[in-house]
Image (tube, rainbow, N blue to C red):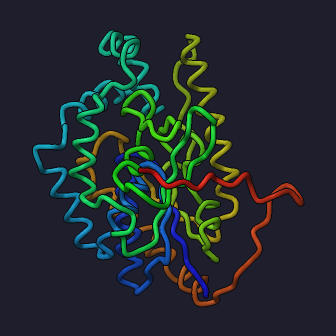
Amino acid sequence: MFRFGLALGGGAAKGFAHLGVLKVLEEAGIVPDLIVGTSMGAVVGAIYAWKTNIEETEEHFRNFLSSEYYDRKTYQKFKEIDQKEPEGVWYALKHLITKGVIYGKSLTSRSVLSQEDYEEDLNILVPVTDFNELKIPFGCIATDLISGDEILITSGNLRKAVMASAAIPGIYAPVVTREMFLVDGGSTNKLPINPTFQLGADVVIGVNVSRHLEEVGDLHSAMDIILRSNSVSTHRLDEMQTLNADYLLCPDVDDLHWADFSQMELAMERGEMVTRQNLKNIKRLLLAKRVRKVLWPFGSHPVYHPAKIVKID
């Protein structure tokens, strides 16, 4: 049976563009047979896999952002510190540390935001407790800091799975379970094209909301150089991992701030725009139902080192 898989990438607040993509696909009668997400892509993917209705999914996020549980002050702090820096979350964290805002926490705690607050937010944001409650097969990517493995979570505790996938190192608390130390999936796979194939998709469309290498900032300190080197390595890895996509949608969200969750509507519009522009090609791709062999771009090597599929309790 032909299966269409949708891969949703990470990108913090920019990931609301995924909602716009899903909206246009749903209007066209195109529903994915499975969804795999990383970080914010995992959050959006999980809620849509549960609701299977874009209006209800959008309303769910709007209700959360307008609730008392959403911590506007913290994200506003990130935005204020990072507003003149193009590099994103890692540089915002650097500035918080170097300015002494979280220096003590960075040395004594595993995250800037407390584990209790993170768990409480995710419990509200993801009301579903188990993968079995989802109506569309779903998986999400996390990274195990112990083994270095890319982890593909497909069953068990959905809240913990999404929490692990979205746990930006240093910002959110890691999820520790079954001898694994799980953090944001973007460390190993920011846009999970290959894991979507791994779960049985015949055709995969990816949505990339953080496709560009950020502009280079100051390189005056060792920390600047380390962070920039990490950004370059991650970007090159992303480029390699997206090569196997049958189709790639890249919403124009570069001008949106990663921590500005108040721009949900604008991010959604960007997702809608790029999907409408490419809808004819997407329909043509899916109607053809051509199952192609996924090839490694550099020769007759395996597609990639497959993700480790786990159940999280």
The reply, left or right, for residue 156 in relation to residue 280 is: left
- Report the number of discs: 0
Query: Where is residue 108 drawn, in percent x and y?
Result: 37, 13
Which percent across, then down, holds residue 257?
35, 41
Q: Is residue 67 left or right of residue 225?
A: left
Residue depicted at 50% across the width and 41% down the height: 178
Quarter of the image for residue 213 reads top right
Q: Is residue 156 visible?
A: yes
- Who is closer to the viewer here, 286 or 152? 152
Above or below — where is 162 with respect to 177?
below
- Above-or-below relation of 44 to 135: above
Q: Residue furthest left?
A: 68
- Percent coordinates x, y for residue 223 in the rendering: 54, 15
**Quadrant of res 16:** bottom left
For image coordinates 39% across by 26% down, the residue present is 92
Q: Residue at x 46, y 71 (%)?
A: 137
Left or right, 293 with respect to 154, comes to right
Q: Position of residue 65 (x, y in %)?
A: 18, 50
Res 294 quadrant in image: bottom right
Q: Specify the quadrant that holds the N terminus.
A: bottom right
Q: Is residue 270 visible?
A: no
> 190 and 274: which one is in front?
190
Q: Residue at x 37, y 48 (%)?
A: 160
Residue nearest the viewer, comparing 45 with 50:
50
